[in-house]
Amino acid sequence: MTQPSSSHLPDHVAIILDGNGRWAKKRGLSRSEGHRAGGEALDRLLDTALEIKIPIISMYAFSTENWKRPAREVSALWKLMLEFFRDRLEKSLQKGIRVVASGDLSRLPAKNRRIIESVIEKTKKGRNLTANFCVNYGSQDEILRAVNRIIQEAAAGNRSKTKPVTRKEFEKHLYTAQLGPVDLLVRPGGEKRISNFLLWQCAYAEMYFTDVLWPDFDETCLREALDWYRKRERRFGALE
Ligand code: FPP
């Protein structure tokens, strides 16, 4: 398959992992089995991203709203993620993947928090791909957190109370401070919404929607999204 020209590759791709449940239902499987297949698709995606040389991938693995799901499904997801990060560590180290996370990890089961923090620490020198796992992540929460941090800095006397906040200062307080804006947002699963994912970072993202359910999203699907992206004319509000 032809390699998309690297000059037209997005620096930062964000993916909403949607459709695990429907994928499972179609096969008479449980939702947890759908999530397991979704985890396997994620593993394959990271390998493809490395091969194509995409610098940054953000993945929506668990949203602040996903707590509303039945407790059984939520705990199956935590179990799956625990296994995923355990299995992924060696691979990430070998392949030069830097794992980072966005979201409030403090609410996660302790085992999950520990494994994610340990993988982040151990892979921090990875230079080939930054894999940003968005876990217990919600964009509105992230924005409020940034605002509140700035208020707290001012209250503590570490910043002026009246100086207007600049975009640069605000972005320093986002989980994605080191990652920058999203160039391409991909949403499999047929829905056409952004679901509280990286709202600030997607201000000028190109948005690609496909009906393919996440567990079926393979190398061909990613390359199709990248080919589509390559043809977009990005103007960032200016003229051609
Ligand atoms: C949305 O599909 C998917 C999720 C809420 C969880 C995503 C999790 C994974 C892909 C696997 C586990 C994660 C890691 C990091 C290993 P859905 O359940 O809403 O699907 P539906 O819309 O078809 O019901």
Image (cartoon, rainbow, N blue to C red):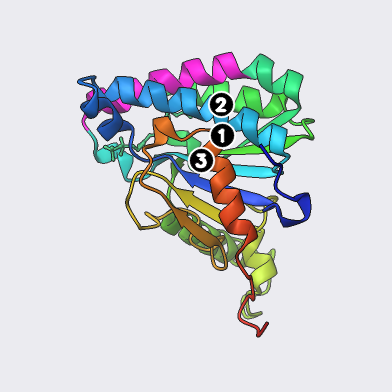
Q: Nearer the viewer, residue 149 or 99?
A: 99
Q: Main secondary structure of the magenta part?
A: helix
Q: Quadrant location of residue 127?
A: top right
Above-or-below relation of 1 to 71 = below
Q: Residue at x 37, y 41 (%)?
A: 18
Q: Quadrant location of residue 128?
A: top right
Tell me if label 1 and label 2 are in contact, CB under 8 Å.
yes
Spatial CA span between label 1 and label 2:
8 Å
Q: Nearer the viewer, residue 104 or 191?
A: 191
Q: Residue at x 26, y 34 (%)?
A: 22
Q: Residue at x 67, y 44 (%)?
A: 56
Position of residue 135 in the picture relative to residue 22 (left or right): right
Residue identifier under label 2: 44
Residue identifier under label 3: 221
Q: Residues within 10 Å of mark 1 (few under 14, many from 20)?
A: some
SS of the residue at dot 1? helix
